[in-house]
Image (cartoon, rainbow, N blue to C red):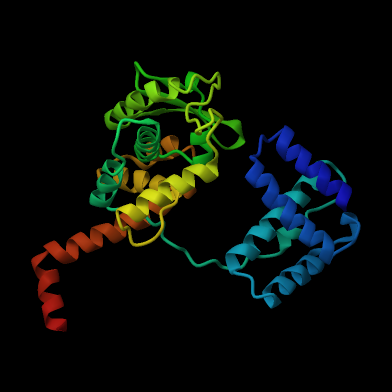
């Protein structure tokens, strides 16, 4: 099976353009599957896969982790079936564990504004931090998309940025005025490093800024403004989408801006919006207030 897993990973990298993070996750999940079932894929059936899932349950893995591993196995057998190595995909007959829906965490408008205003100063570090925060919130980029940006991807005149998303799919995303202002303030400091790197965001040594460094920057400023919990880049992406929806943006437009291939992925924000509307209703509607007072 090991040889087939390696071929599958090469296919994901070469033909699907999967990210390094995705490749690592598939490699880890399929290696665990291989260690549990050291069999030729041709003889593996749905009962074998169910036994693998049962072993994960016994290890007390979260349902979300088990569902992810099953998804990896399904993709692997789908590839083998398409290549003609197996006659059918046995994983299709195995149901995925029901994963509880967790609403995406996002910042309030006040929290987002407080965070954006926190980096102070005109030197390299604070101007870079402010440009990163503003761009993540303004355009809803994934951290991998942000760190892969080159100078040539930024259109300062039109306030647009060309983003390389999952599967190397490109999209054009608008950049808000505050984010453009922050980027303009950062660029002279970037130039002062006198490095030839094409990367938009550089580290202190003039190399491309890493995803880990971006997470550290966000963590630093989220603690400075005393947010309830540590901030990740994805929270700013959720915040971007949620605030657009609150202000009446079309769900299809948000899907395009986020680079989601399926609208169902974007629809999780409608649940957040409904929750927000219910909170507004409970606070504002006279009859809702009356019912709350009766409860007391």
Quadrant in the rendering for residue 208: top right
Q: Which residue is nearer to you in this view: 103 or 116? A: 116
Q: Residue at x 41, y 60 (%)?
A: 103
Residue 205 lies, with reference to residue 237, above or below; the image says above
Is residue 180 toward the left or the right of residue 7 in the image? left
Residue 170 shows up from this direction? yes
Where's the C terminus, which quadrant? bottom left
Quadrant in the rendering for residue 292: bottom left
Q: Which residue is nearer to you in this view: 14 or 101? A: 14
Residue 229 lies, with reference to residue 217, above or below; the image says below
Q: Looking at the image, how many numbered discs can be counted on the residues?
A: 0
Residue 86 shows up from this direction? no
Q: Residue at x 87, y 55 (%)?
A: 41
Q: Residue at x 56, y 68 (%)?
A: 98
Is residue 106 toward the left or the right of residue 63 in the image? left
Residue 148, position as x, y percentages in the image: 54, 31
Is residue 284 toward the left or the right of residue 191 in the image? left
Q: Which residue is nearer to you in this view: 179 or 65? A: 179
Quadrant in the rendering for residue 79: top right
Residue 119, position as x, y percentages in the image: 31, 41
Residue 29, position as x, y percentages in the image: 72, 57
Residue 126, position as x, y percentages in the image: 35, 37
Q: Residue at x 81, y 67 (%)?
A: 48
Q: Which residue is nearer to you in this view: 268 or 206? A: 206
């Amino acid at each position: 099976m090991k040889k087939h897993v390696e071929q599958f990973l090469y296919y994901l990298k070469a033909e699907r353009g999967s990210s390094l993070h995705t490749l690592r996750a598939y490699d880890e999940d399929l290696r665990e599957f291989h260690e549990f079932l050291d069999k030729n894929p041709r003889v593996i059936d749905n009962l074998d896969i169910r036994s693998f899932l049962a072993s994960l349950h016994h290890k007390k893995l979260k349902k979300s982790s088990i569902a992810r591993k099953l998804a990896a196995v399904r993709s692997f057998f789908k590839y083998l079936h398409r290549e003609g190595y197996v006659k059918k995909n046995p994983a299709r007959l195995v149901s995925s564990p029901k994963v509880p829906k967790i609403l995406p965490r996002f910042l309030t408008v006040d929290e987002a504004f407080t965070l954006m205003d926190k980096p102070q100063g005109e030197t390299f570090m604070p101007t870079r931090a402010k440009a990163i925060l503003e761009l993540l919130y303004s355009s809803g980029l994934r951290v991998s998309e942000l760190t892969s940006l080159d100078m040539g991807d930024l259109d300062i005149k039109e306030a647009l940025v060309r983003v390389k998303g999952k599967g190397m799919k490109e999209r054009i995303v608008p950049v808000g005025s505050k984010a453009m202002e922050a980027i303009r303030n950062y660029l002279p400091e970037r130039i002062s490093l006198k490095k030839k790197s094409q990367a938009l965001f550089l580290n202190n040594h003039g190399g491309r800024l890493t995803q880990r460094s971006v997470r550290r920057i966000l963590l630093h400023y989220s603690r400075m403004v005393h947010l309830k919990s540590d901030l990740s880049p994805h929270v700013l992406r959720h915040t971007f989408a949620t605030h657009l929806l609150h202000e009446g943006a079309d769900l299809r437009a948000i899907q395009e801006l986020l680079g989601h291939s399926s609208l169902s992925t974007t629809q999780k924000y409608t649940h957040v919006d409904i929750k927000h509307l219910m909170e507004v209703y409970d606070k504002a509607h006279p009859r809702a207030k009356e019912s709350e007072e009766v409860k007391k």
